[in-house]
Image: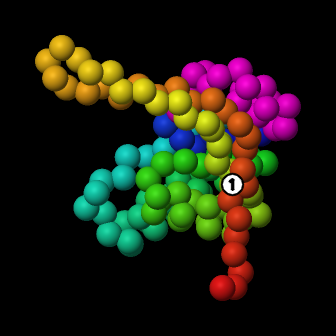
């Protein structure tokens, strides 16, 4: 089972991503990525990550798709590694265009095309 620890529910994934996940892990379970207040310090990040990882590990995932606020992702990836659970990111091609609106503001529109799941590398030495 792939634990989808992102703010992108699997019901909204494109068919390429959905099929790749199901082919590799059979099932997907969504767990929303937590809101990380910008004033959190490192200890609060670690405490929050530990609580979520503890719950996630009880679900026995084969892997975790982990994308969100960077310091929390780093903590999650490290902690899941300690439990022997690999973490992945979804890679995409992004097509963006800017649209000039009548009121002079610019609206940016992006379309993402799934490519693959990339395992987070764990570096043991510099």
Q: Is residue 50 left or right of residue 90?
A: left
Q: Quadrant of residue 31?
A: top right
Query: Is residue 65 at least partly visible in the picture?
Result: yes
Name of the residue lying farthest toward the left: 103
Q: Quadrant of residue 18?
A: top right
94 shown above or below 63: above
> x%, y% of residue 6?
54, 41
Name of the residue lying farthest toward the bottom: 126
Quadrant that contains the N terminus: top right
The residue shown at (70%, 70%) is 122
76 shown above or below 30: below
Q: Which residue is mark 1?
A: 87
Say how many tags the image has: 1
60 or 35, nearer to the observer: 35
Q: Is residue 86 left or right of residue 72?
A: right
Query: Is residue 58 at least partly visible in the picture?
Result: no
* Image: magenta residue range: 8-28
Quadrant that contains the C terminus: bottom right
> x%, y% of residue 99?
33, 21
The residue shown at (38%, 71%) is 42
Element type at marker 1? strand
Q: Is residue 11 magenta?
A: yes
> x%, y% of residue 101?
23, 17
Q: Quadrant of residue 21?
A: top right
> x%, y% of residue 69?
44, 53
Q: Is residue 36 left or right of residue 67?
A: left
Which secondary structure class fits the magenta region best?
A: helix
The residue shown at (53%, 30%) is 95
Q: Is residue 45 magenta?
A: no
Q: Residues within 10 Å of mark 1 (few under 14, many from 20)?
A: many
């Amino acid at each position: 089972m792939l634990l989808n620890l992102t703010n992108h529910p699997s019901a909204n994934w494109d068919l390429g991503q959905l099929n790749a996940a199901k082919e590799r892990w059979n099932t997907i379970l969504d767990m929303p990525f937590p809101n990380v207040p910008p004033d959190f310090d490192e200890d609060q990040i670690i405490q929050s990550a530990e609580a979520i990882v503890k719950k996630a590990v009880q679900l026995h995932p084969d892997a975790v798709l982990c994308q969100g606020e960077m310091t929390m992702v780093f903590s999650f990836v490290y902690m899941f590694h300690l439990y022997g659970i690999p973490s992945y990111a979804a890679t995409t091609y992004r097509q963006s265009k800017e649209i000039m609106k009548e009121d002079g503001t610019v609206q940016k529109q992006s379309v993402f095309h799934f490519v693959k799941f990339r395992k987070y590398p764990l570096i043991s030495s510099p």
